[in-house]
Image: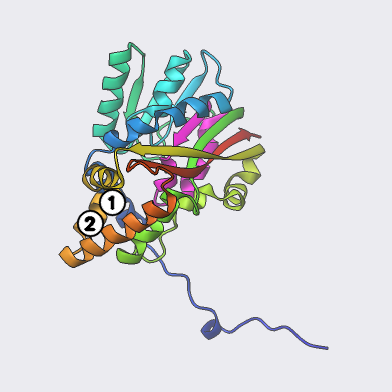
Amino acid sequence: MSTLTAPSPAMTPAAPSVDLSALKARQQATWASGDYAIVGTTLQIVGETLCEAVDLRAGERVLDVAAGNGNASLAAARRFADVTATDYVPALLERALARAAAEGLPLRVETADAEALPFDAASFDVVLSTFGVMFTADHSAAAAELLRVVRPGGRIGMANWTPDGFIGRLFATIGKRVPPPPGACPPANWGRVAWLEEQFGAGAAEIRATPKTFAFRYRSPAHWLEVFRTWYGPVLKAFGALDPAGQEALAADIMALIEAFNRATDGALVVESEYLEVVIRRA
């Protein structure tokens, strides 16, 4: 008979700790850099399809968390919902308000941290996030907040990039040249069904996760890289952290990734990136 013994401390490496406050400050600075709205507006269709997935009804109270420039917010407002958009980058909320005004849509905005939302429990019928809350520093705290502010029987709808999709692979590619802080959780965890069940299962009556794809459509691979390197905070900051040789190497890595995913054969870029469309019904 064999006996199993617990490994000694020396046999089990300690999990690296992370300063969540410092990480949050770094992430906020990242998303405030460039102009995410330049990229965000191209993703509008995801907000529209997410509102359909949660079966949004007119008059429902909707919260868009980490709303950016308001894709899901505007989609919900078009369906006559009562919408509040939150983000920790005020400039992005200003872009959301400008878009709403241009379309004649009512929208409230509030600068807020997704990990500590300034709303009472069960304040909303529907909580949405498109490629937003997945980039928080403390993933478990953010997940708990989504559950807290939605009413029992209400729905949480999210669009989250998956680890193996194009954007998930992009972040992995960047991480090889500009490593994330030790202990930081990968944003693409939110695109894993097992992780969603771990975080939301105890508070959920139902979790539905459907793989979807979003097609980036740009003039060329070089055009995509120019736009993301100039306006998309995580890519802009990654290049800014490298010397000229490192920047050249990262650009080559990203172009190789694009080549692997690009299905256009006419010089343009059509890259499909997988994401999970998630609908959670609160218990």
In the picture, the disc for residue 239 is 2
Magenta stretch: includes residue 130: yes
Q: Is residue 208 above or below residue 85?
A: below
> Which residue range is magenta in the image?
125-151
Residue 53: quarter of image: top right
Kind of residue sitting beneath label 1: Val
List the single residue furthest toward the front.
Answer: 266
Dot 1: within a 10 Å radius of its alpha carbon, few (fewer than 14), some, or many (20 or more) residues? many
Give the quarter of the image for residue 150. top right
Q: Give the CA separation, mark 2 to mark 1.
A: 6 Å
Q: Where is residue 251 in the image (x, y as percent from the top left)?
A: 26, 57
| Quadrant in the picture for the N terminus | bottom right
Please provide percent x and percent y for residue 219: 29, 38
Q: Mark 1 points at which residue?
A: 235
Q: Which residue is found at the position 51% from the left and 13% from the top?
A: 59
Amino acid carrying mark 2 in the image: Phe
Please tell me whether residue 115 is drawn above or below residue 124 in the rendered image: below
Residue shown at the point (36%, 62%) measured from the top left: 175
The location of residue 7, given as percent across then percent down, is 61, 82
Q: Residue 198 carries which label?
A: none
Look at 31% across and 50% down and name the residue there. 27
In the image, farthest residue toward the top: 104
**If the image is split into quadrants, where does the C terminus sit?**
top right
Q: How is the image coloured?
A: rainbow
- The verdict on residue 7 being magenta is no
